[in-house]
Image: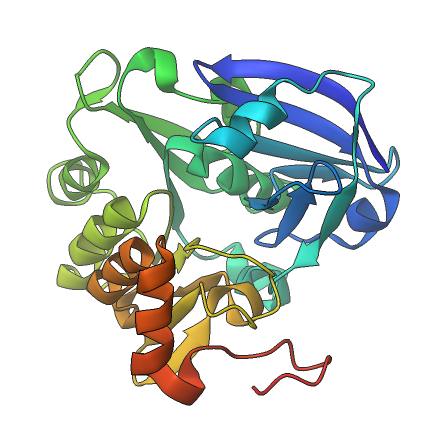
């Protein structure tokens, strides 16, 4: 059992929770995710790690109420327990394997849309800790929906904002703001990391690709088991079939087939759609965790 030790409302229908999970906190790295199960019959809910405190043994998660399960989760209070808190899952950010001195020479920008701010914070905090602070661009529909402003400004080199309605920062979508930053404001970046809704990441990659800037995206399609067996998070990356839960969640943005991923996510929502995908994809429908006997 995993105890909730803190709960905060960050914005309408968006919550932050700190959960006691010492083993997860000990092993978690920026870029990874976990799966929460509230009770014995509960749905498995994948959430990217927002933060971790190895000394306290806590892990921070951020989620938005979008359906029955997340609405039920939002009713949990400090002192309540989750039955399962499985992780860390997936691969850490590639940045943690790079030479620190080389990272300090790079100009890196993180672009966060909506609740994508949570996993971005985890990575930006890590950059601050190694002495290589990075820039961050945060977007939301309105000013009231912007998340973790103070926390992000405490760890980032510079933080820029964009809102769809123009109530704060740049008036418009994140891709337009990024294009303006590069073309008009003459910001120079070697690498852009985008985390958020799939359509947002697609448009950010279009901007970076046109300007020859390397990009990374964090893919969060439907995940059921977190081991590659369900086929929910199957992606086409370049010429290869990958699974976000075991091969990602981060991939080279230039190689992701976003259109296929978005079509597939819509199809996978129904039982008929899942059956159709299994028939079309055959042996490539699922991957396997690589350690439990599944096919890779």
Depth check, front residue: 39 or 61: 39
| Quarter placement of the N terminus | top right
In the picture provided, is 199 more to the left or to the right than 132?
left
Furthest-front residue in view?
Answer: 272
Kindly tell me whether residue 58 is visible in this rendering: yes
Name the colour scheme. Answer: rainbow
From this view, report whether residue 159 is shown above or below residue 36.
Answer: above
Occupied quadrant, residue 2: top right
Give the residue at x 15% y 43%.
Answer: 179
Q: How many marks?
A: 0
Residue 60 x/y as whole percent? 68, 33
Residue 273 x/y as whole percent? 31, 63
| Quarter placement of the C terminus | bottom right
Occupied quadrant, residue 240: bottom left
In the picture provided, is 193 more to the left or to the right than 119?
left
Give the residue at x 63% y 17%.
Answer: 75
Kindly tell me whether residue 215 is visible in this rendering: no
Residue 84 x/y as whole percent? 76, 44
Residue 200 x/y as whole percent? 26, 44
Depth check, front residue: 197 or 286: 286
From this view, report whether residue 144 is shown above or below residue 33.
Answer: above
From this view, report whether residue 144 is shown above or below residue 90.
Answer: above
Give the residue at x 29% y 72%.
Answer: 255
Give the residue at x 56% y 47%.
Answer: 132
In the picture provided, is 192 more to the left or to the right than 120?
left
């Amino acid at each position: 059992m995993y105890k909730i030790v803190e709960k905060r409302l960050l914005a309408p229908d968006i919550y932050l929770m700190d959960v006691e999970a010492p083993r997860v906190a000990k092993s978690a790295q920026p870029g990874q995710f976990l799966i929460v199960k509230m009770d014995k019959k509960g749905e498995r809910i994948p959430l990217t790690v927002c933060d971790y405190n190895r000394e306290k043994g806590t892990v921070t998660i951020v989620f938005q109420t979008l359906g029955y399960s997340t609405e039920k989760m939002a009713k949990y209070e400090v002192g309540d327990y989750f039955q399962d808190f499985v992780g860390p899952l997936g691969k850490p950010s590639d940045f943690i394997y790079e030479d620190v001195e080389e990272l300090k020479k790079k100009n890196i920008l993180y672009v966060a849309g909506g609740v994508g701010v949570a996993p971005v914070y985890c990575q930006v905090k890590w950059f601050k800790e190694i002495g290589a602070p990075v820039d961050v661009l945060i977007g939301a529909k309105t000013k009231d929906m912007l998340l973790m402003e103070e926390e992000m400004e405490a760890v980032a080199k510079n933080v820029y904002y964009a809102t769809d309605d123009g109530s704060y920062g740049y008036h418009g979508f994140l891709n337009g703001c990024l294009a303006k930053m590069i073309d008009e404001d003459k910001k120079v970046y070697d690498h852009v990391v985008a985390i958020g809704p799939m359509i947002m990441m697609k448009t950010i990659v279009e901007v970076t690709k046109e300007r020859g800037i390397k990009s990374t995206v964090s893919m969060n399609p439907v995940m059921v088991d977190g081991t590659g067996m369900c086929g929910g998070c199957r992606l086409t990356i370049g010429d290869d079939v990958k699974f976000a839960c075991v091969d990602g969640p981060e991939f080279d943005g230039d190689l992701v087939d976003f259109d296929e991923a978005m079509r597939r996510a819509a199809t996978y929502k129904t039982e008929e759609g899942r059956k159709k995908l299994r028939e079309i994809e055959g042996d490539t429908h699922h991957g396997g965790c690589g350690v439990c006997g599944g096919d890779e």
